[in-house]
């Protein structure tokens, strides 16, 4: 039974991950991997293309990591102040969500996807909270979020 070398374009469970050069039976390659475009023959030109693609991917991953680290340096010292109306007990009328935090950051020219902001549950009370922002699998920034009463509400409470 003849074996051939192929380069996997996508991960195939029992065989290997994308980018691996593996030996498989000729029939498996001819009847399954090649027609479904899961692999290509491991020729010299395909190996060269693979090496170039892997190098470009590594460079892109390093750039993404560096961008995330730079953004984390900007975010870490930030205090986000959100004004929300609340009852006398300090319980908010509504809640502060990841979208509210992302909108406030966006208003200050810092673009962060709301799905990257990690809140276990929406903030429902006045006070200061620590919120993590997952910028990259290896980089997490931490910001402080303070929920306060609007200034107009502070004046009416002082008079009462």
Image (tube, rainbow, N blue to C red):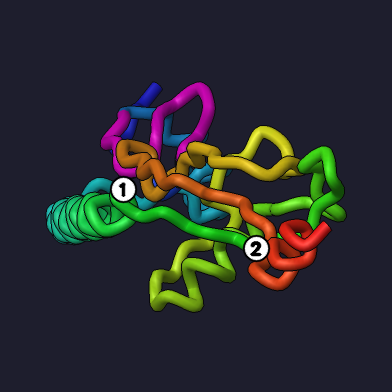
Q: Which of marks 1 and 2 is in front?
A: 2
Q: Which tag, 1 or 2, sits closer to the chain's start?
A: 1
Residues marked 1 and 2 touching at CB (< 8 Å): no
Considering only vertical position in the picture, is 89 above or below 109?
A: above
- Quarter placement of the N terminus: top left
Q: Residues within 10 Å of mark 1 (few under 14, many from 20)?
A: some
Give me the residue at 80% from left, 49% from top: 92
The residue range painted magenta reads 11-22
Name the residue carrying label 2: 83
Q: Does the magenta stretch include residue 28?
A: no
Name the residue carrying label 1: 76
Does the image show residue 54? no
Q: Where is residue 24 in the image (x, y as percent from the top left)?
A: 39, 29
Q: Does the magenta stretch include residue 21?
A: yes
Q: Which residue is nearer to you in this view: 95 or 35?
A: 95
> How far is mark 1 from mark 2, CA to CA?
21 Å
Q: Which residue is nearer to you in this view: 52 or 8?
A: 52
Give me the residue at 47% from left, 40% from top: 132
């Amino acid at each position: 039974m003849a074996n051939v070398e192929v380069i996997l374009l996508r991960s195939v469970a029992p065989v290997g991950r994308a980018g691996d050069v593996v030996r498989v039976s000729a029939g498996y390659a001819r009847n399954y991997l090649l027609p479904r475009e899961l692999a290509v023959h491991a020729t010299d030109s395909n190996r060269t293309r693979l090496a170039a693609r892997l190098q470009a991917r590594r460079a892109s991953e390093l750039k993404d990591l560096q961008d995330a680290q730079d953004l984390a340096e900007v975010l870490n010292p930030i205090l986000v102040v959100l004004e929300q109306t609340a009852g006398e007990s300090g319980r908010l009328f509504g809640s502060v969500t990841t979208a509210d935090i992302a909108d406030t950051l966006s208003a200050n020219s810092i673009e962060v996807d709301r799905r990257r902001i990690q809140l276990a549950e929406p903030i429902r009370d006045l006070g200061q909270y620590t919120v993590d922002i997952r910028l990259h699998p290896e980089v997490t920034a931490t910001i402080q979020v303070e929920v306060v009463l609007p200034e107009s509400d502070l004046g009416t409470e002082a008079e009462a």
